[in-house]
Amino acid sequence: MSILAAGTPVTERVRASIGVFISLAGVACCITLVFLGMRAVMDIGGVCAEGGPFVPRQSCPDGVPALMIGGIWGGIIFVGVYVWQTIKWGVPSLLALAWPALFLSLGWNFFEYALDPPGDEGLVWSWLICGILFFVMGGIPLIAAFGPMMRNFTEERPPPGFGSVIGDPVRVLRDLSASVRSRSGTSTGASDPFTSSPSTEPADPSDLVGELERLDALHRSGALGDSEYAAAKRKLLEDRQ
Amino acid sequence: MSGSRWYWLILQLAAIATGIYLANLLFDAVTT
């Protein structure tokens, strides 16, 4: 059941808030650690090594290897916990920002150090190319995912389940289908799976039990509030009498 | 936007800010 549904107990909301807050803070913390660790390594030329059979030419800054490894693995774990929490509680998610945040922040490091490298080097082309690549890898997903992600926050009823985490692919297809049809002048028939609204069309007018089950499912998913559910159920029963 | 969705958006933005702040504290504590 969605935590957004009316009548959710306060204790459930508190548990959801704590779970979502800690897991997302963990994701942000780990991405930032990787970002800072990369800068520390680039300050000493971009390469370092510790231990192993060879004597390292360049030692790593104190603590940075542990922080970067912890940041990478911790980030993966916290992302998993965050996805679990947002699905469990039906909370709109900012997960779509994680990948762009990682690549744009690391790409920024590449750009900054390519243009102004430590020492007297001039422009470092290899870092500049990496920066461009990282900006493309982070920027394109950000542009593509930002709109659908924010719609989960701005629309009254986000789709339940995984759709609320990464945006709603079905809704994107439905919008696209409607857009293409409106341009080509084709009417949107009721049989169109993307343009028809299943919640407004009875599947079978004689199937009262099926209709009641559908209403109950909508109520349990949080799409219908208590009062809306009661009113719809009453109207359905009255219509059938 | 309903109040509940504002709540979740603000809570998650606060979580991100907190995470970034803690990472800076942790990084400074370990590397200096």
Image (cartoon, rainbow, N blue to C red):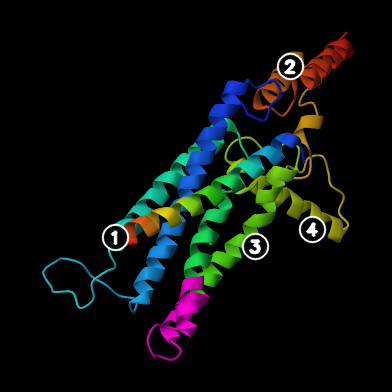
Sooner in the amino-acid sequence: mark 2 or mark 1: 1
Q: Is residue A33 above or below residue A78?
A: below
When asked about the image quadrant of residue A136, the answer is bottom right
The chain letter for the residue carrying disc 1 is: A
The chain letter for the residue carrying disc 3 is: A
Provide the major secondary structure of the magenta segment. helix
Disc 1 marks a residue whose amino acid type is Gly
Q: Secondary structure at mark 4?
A: helix
Q: Are marks 1 and 3 on the same chain?
A: yes
Left or right of residue A208, residue A84 in this image: left
Contact between labelled residues 2 and 3, with CB atoms less than 8 Å apart? no
Separation (CA) of disc 1 from disc 3: 35 Å
Q: Are marks 3 and 4 on the same chain?
A: yes
Start and end of the magenta stretch? A108-132
On the image, numbered disc 1 is attached to which residue?
A63
Disc 2 marks a residue whose amino acid type is Leu
Sooner in the amino-acid sequence: mark 3 or mark 4: 3
Residue shown at the point (49%, 78%) measured from the top left: A112
Separation (CA) of disc 3 from disc 2: 41 Å
Identify the residue at the far top of this view.
A241
Contact between labelled residues 1 and 4, with CB atoms less than 8 Å apart? no
